[in-house]
Amino acid sequence: MIFGYVLFAYSNDKSMFKDLILNKCDKYSDIYTINRVSPSFKLKTQKPISTTHDHFTIVSEDFKNFCLNENYTGLEFVNLPSAPGFYWFKIHNTILLNPEDKGIRFINFNSDCNGYEEIIGATPAYLKIEEKISDGFFRSDICFGSYETKTPLKIIGIETMEKLKKKGFKGIYGSEIKPIYE
């Protein structure tokens, strides 16, 4: 049985943090908490969805319109000042992961910054719930990665994946989410 998918997109070979000045605690944070985009970030790709080297999910106007037409809620499309027609795609609907059963590792906690340097071990994803994900976009409650590039998993329902494929969006693939004890 499949519960849904962890959504992935191909790299656009760009970096959002390249021109940003980060503070000392940002390396113990995640991209949602840092919550800044580079005013000089440029993108010329025609991919509807892609990912930067530092894990920002970038979507096109077409992808944004698809989400709006499907009435998906809990989504935010952050304008990129130097990349008209492209947006940082943020998901605010949260699904809890089950770190006890998965072996997620939290590395180098910094009490001054109240965060970890790295959080790793997200594949495959194990959820706290054991039911199918509804149609829509969700994010994990835990952000994974190293230093300031930690980001949540993007989780979608089976119906959502079918709609994305039917729409013909290129550069998107998913990793199946299955029951813990299948």
Image: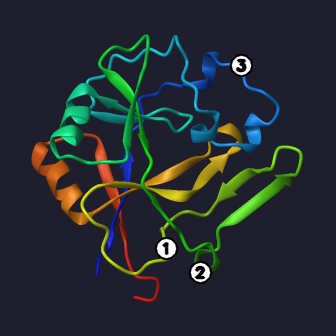
Q: Which residue is mark 2?
A: 101
Q: Secondary structure at mark 1?
A: loop
Q: Secondary structure at mark 3?
A: loop
**Where's residue 8, x and y in %?**
38, 49
Q: Callout 2, which amino acid? A: Asp
Q: Earlier in the sequence, mark 1 or mark 3?
A: 3
Query: At 48% from the left edge and 32% from the top edge, which residue is drawn?
Result: 52
**Where's residue 90, x and y in %?**
43, 40
Mark 1 Cα-neighbour bin, 10 Å: few <14, some 14–19, many ≥20? many
Q: Is residue 44 above or below residue 63?
A: above
Q: For the N terminus, which image quadrant?
A: bottom left
Asked whether the residues under the numbered discs 1 and 2 touch, taking CB atoms below 8 Å apart as contact, a structural biologist would say: yes
Mark 3 Cα-neighbour bin, 10 Å: few <14, some 14–19, many ≥20? few
Query: At 72% from the left edge and 51% from the top edge, which residue is drawn?
Result: 118
Q: Nearer the viewer, residue 1 or 143?
A: 143
Q: Which residue is mark 1?
A: 126
Q: Which mark is residue 21?
A: 3
Give the farthest residue toward the left: 166
Query: At 55% from the left edge and 59% from the top edge, which residue is drawn?
Result: 141
